[in-house]
Amino acid sequence: MSMLEQLQVKTGRLPEKYTKMATAELEERVAKVKQELGKRLFVPGHHYQKDEVIQFADTTGDSLKLAQVAAENKDAEFIVFCGVHFMAETADILTEPHQKVYLPDMRAGCSMADMADIYQTDRAWETLQAMFGDTIMPLTYVNSTAAIKAFVGVNGGATVTSSNAEKMVSWALTQKERLLFLPDQHLGRNTAFNLGIPLANMAVWNPILDQLEYDGEMENIQVILWKGHCSVHENFTVENIRQVRSDYPDMKIIVHPECRREVVALSDYAGSTNYIIDVIEKAGPKSSFAIGTEMNLVKRIIKDHPDKHIISLNPNMCPCLTMNRIDLPHFLWCLESLETGFEDNRIIVNEPTASNAKLALERMLAFS
């Protein structure tokens, strides 16, 4: 490795040589490193990843499945996570001390996770405890930082995914009178509503203004929703649904529960990424669907089901920009860096954050 390449690696910059490689060479070199490392290397890939990367994943799934796989894998020395930062953090928390977790591009974050930091959460908790006393159980979507997971773990709560949110919210409400749900208000609202909790009994915590947004009687509050959202799923609208109903009257609409409440209410189906995939796989030939979720996945589903008519609910939707940070050049760079000993893309969650976050994750996994 040249001096320039070493400097680029040390500063977290992709060496220029990778940007100049043809796709065929990138793929050939990835396959070569994977073969050389064998079982020492494990590559989990989230469903929202690009096809150019997901083709090399050893397992694919949504956040729940990948969390379970991370907890079960005890052998691989190197885990190169094709997803976003909070997912790699979760893998580092759940794997063994001898295992090392890497993220091919450290810029692959999550805008939703960034909408709740630990300083905002500590302030909110202090205020809410003063208002409601020891009556609140915190839950956090796995789309959150390790620090938020640790906060939830210390305070007796658990993590959730879109696959098990109803189960975890039901559990939380057997433990305490109220629930604080971070950081996605839409998943929290849709889940609570499905469990029979009236919208009138849900308040919103605004972390920017440090205040509770609610018009009713305070004692009626059962769920406190953090004012965060997914920048992809919030872009599916009621107007998108009206357009599909007009253009394709017989088409079924299936959306992710990170979408707004009014969008979920008007859809035919709503569920996790794995749920969406499963519904479409089980549907008969010539079935038609408009899907409200991330575009990389929608395109893959369309390709995998040529016997069905499938479109995106929002034709102007783009892929998740942070998921798209992981591309073939960054992936190869990360793999080849393992052979040279450079570890700038390694994800390490410090103690005691990791131990406390693990409490929240293990409470969830015990129910999954």
Image (cartoon, grey):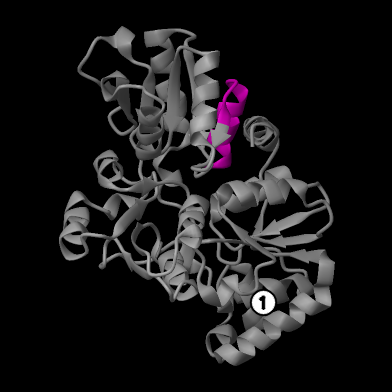
Q: Quadrant of residue 296?
A: bottom left
> Image check: 284 left or right of 154?
left
Residue depicted at 40% across the width and 23% down the height? 124
x%, y% of residue 81?
63, 60
x%, y% of residue 156?
60, 21
x%, y% of residue 261?
29, 39
Question: What residue span does the magenta drawing correspond to?
Answer: 145-158
Number of marks drawn: 1
Asked if one can make out residue 21 in the rendered structure from this viewpoint, the answer is no
Nearest the viewer among 112 and 344 is 112
From this view, report whether residue 100 is shown above or below residue 309.
above
Q: Which residue is mark 1?
A: 6
Q: Quadrant of residue 53?
A: bottom right
Q: Is residue 53 magenta?
A: no
Crowding around mark 1 (Cα neighbors within 10 Å: few <14, some 14 to 19, many 20+) is some
Nearest the viewer among 348 and 288 is 288
From this view, report whether residue 54 is shown above or below residue 259.
below
Residue depicted at 37% across the width and 23% down the height? 196
Predominant secondary structure, magenta span: helix
Residue depicted at 62% across the width and 82% down the height? 4
